[in-house]
Amino acid sequence: MIGRREFITLLGGAAAWPLGAQAQQSERMRRVGVLLPYAREDSIANSGVALFLQAFEALGWTQGRNVEIDLRWADGSFERMQALARELVNLQPDVILTSNGAPSARAVAQATKVIPIVFTAVSDPVALGLVESLTHPGGNLTGFSLYESSLGTKWVEGLKRIAPGVRRVAVMFNPETSLPALYFTAIETAAAKLTIEVSQNPVGNPTAINAAMEDLSRGPGGGLLLLPDTFLIAHREMIVEWAASYRLPAVYPIGEFTAAGGLMSYGVDLLDIHRRAAAYVDRILRGAKPADLPVQQPTKFELVINLRAATALGLTVPDALIALADRVLE
């Protein structure tokens, strides 16, 4: 995780820059817009964009020398994302990077059909109409998908392994910012094999999240799964706190939930996606067209287990599961 101080240092360009940047100093100043869906203080926003900037620097782009980078934070508000997307488009950047999910990508896509856009962590850009196909995007957008078909199966199996008493699983998502159909077939198939009852729990505000957890906690054997969802990620600390108070074992879609105190997470490494996005922004700045750059699938996944959370729930994590973990938090 990259701290706020390191992030500011990267943005200010205080580090030594590679020789490749010197060869570009005679070129015109380029401009990159970045739209982040979360608050300025959010650790995901800071870490993701900081790793993007590190990788971008290594490719020869120096803030203030040959590129200007305009960052905008939407504080979790889609309406604000739309306004900031128009603001970035009015700056006429050479390319816009959208961070962490479909809402920011859709906001910028609605604001321009001309400026190249690189999106990150979008579950299904084809279903959302952002690209024509993964191999041939066909327009002014390309980027990095979040979807992997096996995730639903692994979430259910992981929850059962860490909490064997689970018999009922509520799957939580915001229908405005998530695509539950991508995961439900795998979730229901895995749950049926383990004799687990599955329910869908669409939520659109914190009150609905609390109510769904309270309802689940009224009977024995309840467990919780969260889908990859910009809205839920933005409220992860509150969700983790409520899950603990209702004593609900939960499996989350990214490691940042577990870092906030959640029991277990398995999913795509968002920071790796931001690191890889630098190469696409670089290629576009050097003349490539988004239509010719295939949408990239996730390549790095992470299993994180929080032993303190397990102890608080009275759970003993199997040694075999700990051995599989990429990170174990104690």
Image (spheres, grey):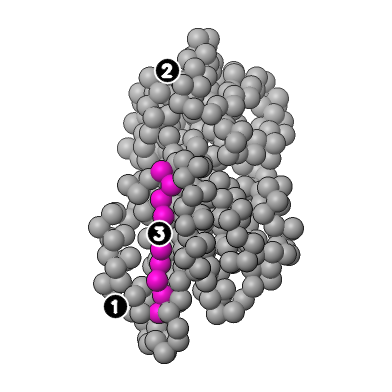
Quarter residue 192 falls in: top right
**Sequence-first disc among 2 and 1:** 1
Q: Is residue 71 magenta?
A: yes
Q: Nearer the viewer, mark 2 or mark 1?
A: 1
Instruction: Point out residue 297 in the picture as x, y percentages from the top left corner.
Output: 63, 57
Query: How busy is the neighbourhood of tag 3: few (under 14 within 10 Å), some, or many (20 plus)?
Result: some
Please tell me whether residue 218 is drawn above or below residue 179 in the rendered image: above
By secondary structure, the bulk of the magenta-drawn segment is best described as strand
In depth, the one of 152 and 109 nearer the eye is 109
Please say whether residue 257 is visible from this viewpoint: yes
Q: CA distance from mark 3 to mark 1?
A: 22 Å
> From the viewer's perspective, is 244 left or right of 162?
left
In depth, the one of 132 and 92 nearer the eye is 92
> From the viewer's perspective, is 96 left or right of 156?
left
Mark 2 secondary-structure assignment: loop
In depth, the one of 82 and 200 nearer the eye is 82
> From the viewer's perspective, is 16 left or right of 181?
left
Residue pointed to by mark 2: 246
Residue pointed to by mark 1: 16
Q: CA distance from mark 3 to mark 2?
A: 38 Å
Residue pointed to by mark 3: 71
Residue at 50% over, 68% down: 92
Please tell me whether residue 297 is drawn above or below residue 263 in the rendered image: below
Query: Where are the magenta residues, as a range?
Result: 66-75
Mark 1 secondary-structure assignment: loop
Q: Is residue 320 magenta?
A: no
Number of marks drawn: 3
Amino acid residing under circle 2: Tyr
Instruction: Point out residue 40 in the picture as x, y percentages from the top left corner.
Output: 35, 49
